[in-house]
Image (tube, rainbow, N blue to C red):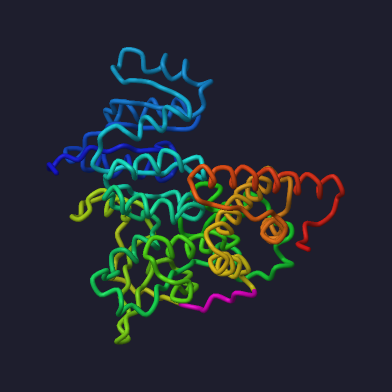
Amino acid sequence: MSDVRRISIFGATGSVGQATADVVLHNRKSFDVQVVTANSNVDALAELAVKLGAKYAVIGQEEHYKALQNVLLGTGIHVSAGAAALIEAATVPCDVVMAAIVGMAGLPPLMKSVEQGCCVAIANKEPLVAAGTHLMEAANASGAKILPVDSEHNAVFQVFDDQQKKTIERIILTASGGPFRERLEDELEDITPAQAVAHPNWSMGAKISVDSATLMNKALEVIEAHYLFDVPANQIDVVIHPQSLIHSMVEYCDGSILSQMGAPDMRTPIAYCLGWPSRMPTSGQKLSLNERISMEFYPADLQRFRALQMAYDCLDAGQERCGVFNAANEIAVQAFLEERIGFNDILRVNAYVLENCEKFSIKTLADVVNMDNTVRTFTSAYIDNIRQNSKKVYAS
């Protein structure tokens, strides 16, 4: 690999995509940008494409094709649109791909990128949760290197000694606990979307911020860690660490616990992935040890943080239930953001769907997509039904 890395950024206008662009611009001579994509934000995508000198710009929603084409007219940037165009863009030769499309919409181009055999930095946890087995098998077949962007998994990746895997006792994922960690469940009934997206430490998108508030984010990360590091669920623990300075830990058989710490800034794990196996500078926040720092750790109560228990139950049940869990949660969170259900209803919807949705046979990627679509329809219908009947959303 040359000193200049060819990079594509899928989901370039989201929070992770923009942070990735910042890292690239800070190390401009180290990157040759190939592809940038977005779902619908034409102006932001066009601006990034020009600023980064991208060769291709792809908009997910086809109705925005003409608008993007007009904005980029005369720039020499090739414009395309639609789901098929996103998959085609994943075949453009690259050294590293940033996979940051939120939700399951990112699975097809992500899988295509993995099949190309390059380094793939995964920021969208949902495909790993729903199709972790398939993604890791594809990576093993193609020789692709999967690099986790999530701060917690990135931290584990940095201190996980794959050569001495048998000596690893457990992975310890840290969680801030979200903005409501000290409130009781009955105090959360009237939480608004605006309150839920206001994370105390991290700057994130709306969906992941809500997931952090319910601890669903950490629940999905437990599942993600299982597939990324091939570690059994009973060797993955979660601790509450409100300061978000230690991002995760690995405990070894001799009692040593190795951790990665730093300021809560996504540019740090992003830069680690883009530069791997080397490191590169960022314009991100640095952690100062020249002033007094307090750090607290609390056990994660699985009865209080019910999303975590759901995650362990899903792993016990297998990949299929993990996919159901993910799809149900995406629909429930969207319904909450649209103020169609309450905050506490998110977990109630998830519990109901896990218990009542049909079982699926998952053998191919097409099976994953079919399962995902079916669960979304089932979950949406359930939410519509309880709204029409003006009932609280309680699992049976």
- Give the x, y percent position of residue 115: 33, 43
Q: Is there any visible trace of residue 345 in the rendered image?
A: no
Give, as a single range, the part of the protein colored magenta: 297-303
Q: Is residue 134 left or right of residue 199?
A: left
Q: Is residue 206 above or below residue 85?
A: below
Query: Which residue: 49% across, 62% down?
Result: 223
Q: Is residue 163 left or right of residue 187?
A: left
Residue 355 location, quadrant: bottom right
Q: Nearer the viewer, residue 393 or 265?
A: 393
Q: Is residue 237 left or right of residue 19?
A: right
Q: Is there any visible trace of residue 166 in the rendered image?
A: yes
Q: Is residue 12 above or below residue 193?
A: above
Main secondary structure type of the part rendered in magenta:
loop
Query: Which residue: 39% across, 25% down?
Result: 46
Q: Is residue 108 above or below residue 139?
A: above
Residue 349 location, quadrant: bottom right
Query: Which residue: 23% across, 42% down?
Result: 95
Q: Nearer the viewer, residue 171 or 257?
A: 171
Quarter of the picture holding the C terminus = bottom right
Q: Is residue 331 magenta?
A: no
Q: Nearer the viewer, residue 335 or 48?
A: 335
Residue most extreme to the left = 2
- Give the x, y percent position of residue 169: 37, 80
- Give the x, y percent position of residue 364: 48, 47
Q: Is residue 110 above or below residue 157?
A: above
Q: Nearer the viewer, residue 85 or 139?
A: 139
- Give the x, y percent position of residue 26: 24, 42
